Image (cartoon, rainbow, N blue to C red):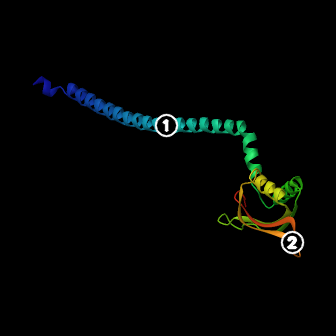
Amino acid sequence: MNLLNNKKPFWALAVGLAVLALLGALIWFTYGKIKQSSMVSAEAEGKIAFLEKKEREFVLAESNLKDFGPEIDLLDGAFLSEGTFVDLLRLLESLAKKTGITFSAQNARLPQSDKEMASLNFEITGDFRGVANFLALLDKMPYAGIVDGANISPKAEGQKRTGVITARINYIIFNFKI
């Protein structure tokens, strides 16, 4: 009976259980925060790894861009634009001079959208060999294109043939950038 009358052990036990419950709640709360922080940390590590991978890819791409700079410039120079269209005409005139024929640009159609193609109508006049050489040199130009149509006719003075031919050509340009 002395145990029941002595309330000290009861209160000590109650305080001990309360402290243990409080300590358990504190541990449970701390564990939850640690788990949440671990998830945030793992997610951040994943994002950092992803960004580091993208950075390496970017550095590699930048290095490749520098390495292939001359080739890119060469390709870029092969594309025509309104600003460089005159260069094409000068090239055609120089090819005509080289092959001994006359060149006359008739009409040019520049595209207004990516779906349209650029074309150039021109006329060349000269002997058969010169005209044939000019047409062969068209394939060696740095600008991609194709002869879409050609109307070749002999030039005559009355009934007498002169040996001179005239070719009216429609040339489509593939690599025109707007």
Q: Are marks 2 and 1 in contact (CB under 8 Å)?
A: no
Q: Position of residue 77 (x, y in %)?
A: 77, 50
Residue 89 x, y percent position in the rendering: 84, 59
Q: Secondary structure at mark 1?
A: helix
Residue in the image at 56% along x and 36% along y = 53
State the CA–CA distance, disc 2 to disc 1: 81 Å
Which of discs 2 and 1 lies nearer the camera? The answer is 2
Locate residue 109, reporting x and y percent: 76, 68
Name the one closer to the observer, 121 or 112. 121
Mark 2 or mark 1, earlier in chain: 1
> Which sits in the foreground, 33 or 11?
33
Element on which disc 2 rests: strand
Q: Is residue 52 left or right of residue 144?
A: left
Res 46 label: 1
How many neighbours does mark 2 have within 10 angstroms: few (below 14), some (14-19), or many (20 or more)?
A: few
Type of amino acid under label 1:
Gly
Splitting the image into 4 quarters, where does residue 63 fall?
Answer: top right
Report the number of discs.
2
Name the amino acid type tagged 2: Ala
Query: Which residue is pictured at 28% across the width and 33% down the height?
Result: 21
Q: Is residue 109 above or below residue 11?
A: below
Whether 27 is drawn above or below 154: the answer is above
Q: Is residue 88 above or below residue 6?
A: below
- Could you say which is closer to the camera, residue 118 or residue 35? 118
- Name the quadrant of the C terminus: bottom right
Q: Position of residue 46 (x, y in %)?
A: 49, 37
Tell me the quarter of the image containing the N terminus. top left
Residue behind mark 2: 156
**Which is more toward the observer, 152 or 1?**
152
